[in-house]
Image (tube, grey):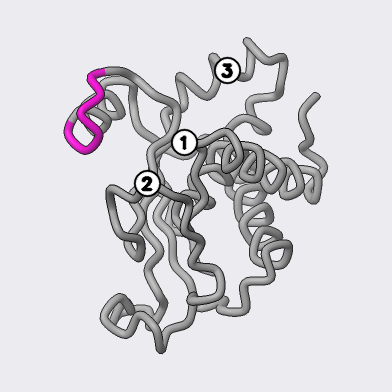
Amino acid sequence: MKINFNKVLLNKKYIKSISLALENALKILKIKCIDLEVNISFVSKREIKNLNNKFRNKDMVTDVLSFPNLLEQNKTNMQLIIDKLDKNNFKNEIDPETNLLFLGDICICKAVAFKHARQYKNSYLREIVYMAVHGFLHLIGYDHLKNDDKKIMREVEEKIMCSINLRRD
């Protein structure tokens, strides 16, 4: 999997930990296609508020937003695409420059992630990686609108975080 990070990333430790977490996510979820590409951007409170307002009609700051490229928008039920993740199933979504299947974009607000880290007594690293994992799961169809779906998503998140020794403190 190729992860494109914007230049506002904090340090190499964050890049390494996010990359490892998403590689482990592929293994844990048994995703066979590894020719995948994801963009991760770190944005300000103002930027994430504007994105949240523009794309979700929610005029508020949030911690992470995901913009799936392969999912139908406005879905009401969690619809995983794990079994469909194959370049043959999404021929029009292959980046011609990289020859990789583009899953989508994840935007993380560092300020909110750091606030959550203090609030939940987690490290900044754990919170940033958690936001990336959470965003990635949204890109492949996980959601938390319904309590049952939320429980499933949280279990998968924790399994991935534990796989890189960043479980909840």
The residue under the point 71% across, 60% down is: 24
Q: Locate residue 43, reporting x and y percent.
A: 35, 32
Q: Which element is circle 2 on?
A: loop
Q: Residue furthest bottom?
A: 88
Sort mark 1 into few (<14), some (14-19) or many (20+) by Cα contacts within 10 Å. Answer: few
Q: Residue furthest top?
A: 119
Circles 2 and 1, Cβ within 8 Å, touching? The answer is: yes
Query: In the drawing, does residue 18 fall left or right of residue 5?
Result: right
> Quick one: 32 or 41, which is closer to the camera?
32
Q: Between disc 2 and disc 3, whose residue precedes? A: 2
Q: Locate residue 25, reporting x and y percent.
A: 66, 58
Query: In the drawing, does residue 105 fall left or right of residue 132?
Result: left
> Quick one: 60 or 117, which is closer to the camera?
60
Q: Which mark is residue 34?
A: none
> What amino acid is labelled 3 in the image?
His
Q: Which element is circle 3 on?
A: helix
Count up the numbered dots. 3
Tell me where the magenta segment starts and ends, as one range: 54-59
Q: CA distance from mark 2 to mark 3?
A: 28 Å
Q: Which mark is residue 116?
A: 3
Q: Between disc 1 and disc 3, whose residue precedes? A: 3
Residue carrying label 1: 145
Rendering quarter of residue 95: bottom left
Sort mark 2 into few (<14), some (14-19) or many (20+) by Cα contacts within 10 Å. Answer: few
Q: Between disc 2 and disc 1, whose residue precedes? A: 2
Q: Which mark is residue 76?
A: 2
Mark 1 or 3: in front is 1
Q: Locate residue 55, reporting x and y percent.
A: 21, 38
